[in-house]
Amino acid sequence: MTPQLRVMQVNLGRGERAQDIALQTAQEKRVDVLLLLELYRPPANNGRWAFDCSKKVAIVATGSLPLQRIWCSNTPGLVAAEIGGTTFLSCYAPPRQPTDEFERFIEAVQLETLTHSQVVIAGDFNAWHVEWGSERNSEKGEELLSAIQQLDLVVLNQGTTSTFDGNGAATASIVDVAFATPTIAQPGTWNVCGDYSYSDHRYITYTVGTIVPVVNEPSSPRMRHQGRIRHADRRYKATQFSQRAFRARFSERAVSHERMVEIMLATCDKTMQRVTTSHSDPHRDLFWWTPLLRLLRENCDRARDRMRQTSDLQERSIAAAEHRTARAELGKAIKASKRNSFQELIDIAEENVFGAGYLVVLSHLRGGRTPPETERDRLEHIVSDLFPQHPPLVWPEAADIEGEEQPGAVADVSDDELKLIARRMANKKAPGLDGIPNAAVKAAILEHTGVFTALYQDCLVNGTFPAAWKRQRLVLIPKPGKPSGVSCSYRPLCMLDALGKVLERLILNRLHEFLEDPESPRLSDRQYGFRRGCSTIGLIQRVVEAGQRAMSFGRANRRDKRFLLVAALDVRNAFNTASWQAIATALRTKRVPAGLQRIIHSYFQDRELVYETSEGPVVRSVTAGVPQGSILGPTLWNTMYDGVLDIALPPDAEILGYADDLVLLVPGTTPDNVKAAAEEAIISVMEWMARHHLELAPAKTEMVVISSTKAPTRITVRVGDVDVTSSRSIRYLGVTLQDKLSWLPHVKEVTERAGKIADATSRLLRNHSEPRASKAKLLASVSESVMRYAAPVWSKELQKREPGRLLERVQRKMALRVARAFRTVRYETATLLAGLTPICLLLDEDARVYQRLSAVNRTDTRANIRKQERQATIEQWQQQWDAEADTSRHTRWAHRVLPNIGSWQSRKHGDVSFHLCQVLSGHGFFRDYLCRNGFTSSPDCQRCSGVPETAEHAMFECPRFAEVRQQLLGEGITDPVRPENLQQHLLRDAESWSRICEAAKRITASLQQAWDDERAALAAHGNEQHFEEVADLEARRAEIRRARNDRRNASRRAARARQRELQRAGRPPSPPPSPRTAARRADLRLRQARFRARRRQAI
């Protein structure tokens, strides 16, 4: 039975405001599917939207049902999507489309329709026919009706109400039509609405789906409550949690885990409210919709009705003018409301940097939330694919374990261990089926540690894992960029009870103590995932070192293994298909104590998976896999997976692992040798996988051949039934590995990704609003963290110019926004004012820290190592800052007022404001700066004739601001603020910082107002002389830009020369070029100069 779906369709006429109002109207009418034609622009990365290749039509899931599948074709104006088991086709054919193109368009619609059983075709075909209420038939209408009859669809249009109101060039007509499969068609629900749409088309609503018999609603509240679908879990409003109130009410003692859960649930009920619904209302108003907008929309509706009902031409003209005015007011109000709503998000960012504003701006990159899949049949199919059934588990008895000294020996639970586990619990983790939040469990354990210690000790001694804690709540997270409705498009997470996670942590501590014993480790050193002291960086470094060995050999010696095949192998649905029998065998093989084996056996017995459907919760037994979300699961996976790392491989071949990700390293002297060895190794891996109920995904295998040969080497390897050909680069564990071990492709990729994040988060950083610079630095750290990933592996690439330039470009973008600086501020100055460590120095610091942490005999803690290396970074930064002091006049000024980087970075107070940044950088509303950039005709101060108006003159010398300096800068007293002691006064205390900021604000605001007045007067002049001055000003701007570029290039050449001197480190300089080489270089420079001169003349 197909659910009934309420549908609304409208042609927006490419209008932005029409699209805004349509989305809001869909919420008010509580429709499930919105079909948009000639839309303005679809949002980026929104899982509720499906649109065609030309972005003309879209299907939007506006209700509680998701887009189950999307079919996109190469035909512009056609898109198909499945919602609630019904396939919707949104179509648009332009009015001037030739007949032959229209016929091809109809053929494409027919082909798409034939593959689906329950279909709704809706759109604007610009075709007329009496069958859907038109007064006449057109050739396109005949063609469309013939196609609909061949598909055996029903016309949903009813009546003769026009769907298109006309626009002056065209009269009112019925061009918006809809057709549906007879089993789901409900023509009686067709309605052409009179709501204001801000478009020349009207809203159309109708219902499709199987007609459900009307059942009388129960009269009593109790009967109505019984008719609701019950949810499997309970949830509390964790924001209401109070540690003091919880501890005051949690005073009983429990002797069993069942009683403990009952007591905690009773205490939670007394201190927090329950969440009544599992999901918020999908039809709530849009975030920017206000009562004022509703009133303005009603005004537009009334003005439009007056215009339609008036027959007198003069009155109609007046009504049309009133309608245009009301329409313009509504459009401006919508724009202003969106702006105000976003400003509220910016204000919230001051209190919570990573709150609502951060989530909104990043939703354009990561995608917004989509409604979960709830259709039972579809969910059962997805869950069956993700959680396959395995044969019953036959666990070995304790007596079968050879060499076990003490079968029941398991370390006792101590109060200190339990308190440490509780303190490390994150408060905001999602709860399991019992709904008890982590904060409540933490408070209870810390208050009554002895009770919980006895409870968990009893579980370990008896070797039992309570049944209530073996039930897991399934949450399916859609993977971005994956097709909808396919099991591999979801990441299954299992929400476990917090009390059960504590017991898992206790088991894990004892299992780690045995498996990771330094004297006799039981796990392979080639496994880097979920282990203490191991990370992705170590694994990537090991692969890179193997590649460097291959590249270190010459190109002529055929005995050297100068080829290295790096094959990244993917395991299909790895964690959910892990064999419990294989885990049990691995635990026995590694001689894990019998006490741990007993409780792990109990951990696997009678596990259940619970997931929500539209018909209520469904319980499914679990017979394989380790829960994704479990604390103990990853280590059990490593124990079982350890065997694949020890399989027999061809000589010199090696296999490494990070969790379920495998990388195969196969060296060889020739490509043929490498291919043969790789296929032999892959066959061995696949055989081991088959014995342990696992399976490789051959189509996801990626390979790259690292070698010192000049030409790229391509090798095709057979993986299962798929031939996989090596490529120039692969992406492994977040790093791009290139066949020549060049890190430039990786740097380009991470800078592109970090640049998008910087663009998104920069929207929260305005010149005159929150958040402050100290909070804005946290937003900048998001993009920095992307660039810093795996830096110890590739930081040596920064010795080249191009990678550093790309990284600095992204960081400069964020530094300018954090410091509220003008876009012309140099990178070195912008990072200093923003308080951001230059990215190249930061990456070099990360590499030094990792190297010291990886040392075998290190004695310092991680915090001390980071502190020492940060001090070394500050010293390097100071040296670079001093060396760059004479690069430009503005850098010279910035170095003069901020000479000491260490004290500036370590300050405990003060945020750089928009106005203070102008004074410190020299880039601001100073006439000298404006003139150099071509915005004013003279650099001189308007008060002091012949004196350039620089930051120093305006802040410390100009008589216009003498009163400001006397009030705020201490002019006339013993120690006034001067450029030489400006940093000292800023860092003295918070009050001094505030006074200087206020002085900078008053002075720069006055200068900005003076410039605005000058521009307004110049614009009002508006004569021929003004246009000539503008032309001269443009020419002067071009000359200024050329001069600035020449100075910049000279500075860069000087910096490169200084860098070469530093790299030479006392060695004698290179010999001068020969006369012939010198003449050739001079001729080249001359030709370049002539070319640039010709380009300037052409411009």
Image (tube, rainbow, N blue to C red):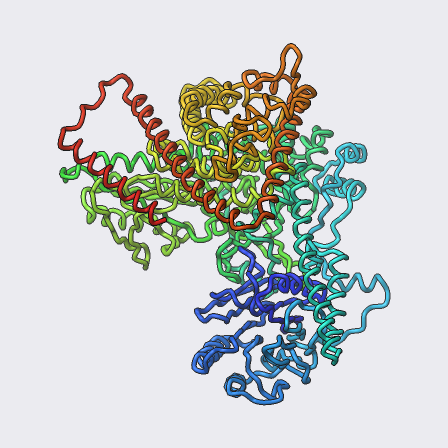
In the depicted view, which residue is nearer to us: 125 or 1008? 1008
Is residue 114 depicted above or below 881 in this figure?
below
- State left or right for residue 468 relative to residue 927: right
Q: Is residue 760 visible in the rendered structure shown here?
A: yes
Residue 519 in view of the camera: no
Q: Nearer the viewer, residue 1035 or 339?
A: 1035
Nearest to the observer: residue 1054 or residue 867: 1054
Nearest the camera: 406 or 459? 459
Where residue 566 appears, as percent x and y from the top left, is 31, 44
Residue displayed at 44% across by 33% down: 534
Locate the N terminus and report the quarter of the image it occupies.
bottom right
- Residue at 68 percent across and 49 percent down: it is 341
Residue 197 picture location, percent across and down: 67, 68
* Total numbered circles: 0
The x and y percentages for residue 342 are 65, 47
Left or right of 189 on screen, residue 805:
left
Residue 402 picture location, percent across and down:
44, 35
Q: Is residue 229 above or below residue 428?
A: below
Residue depicted at 62% across the width and 27% down the height: 1000
Relative to 649, is 52 on the left or the right? Answer: right
**Picture layout, residue 2 above or below residue 608:** below
| Picture quadrant where residue 171 is located | bottom right
Residue found at the far right of this picture: 220
Residue farthest toward the top in the current orientation of the protein: 974
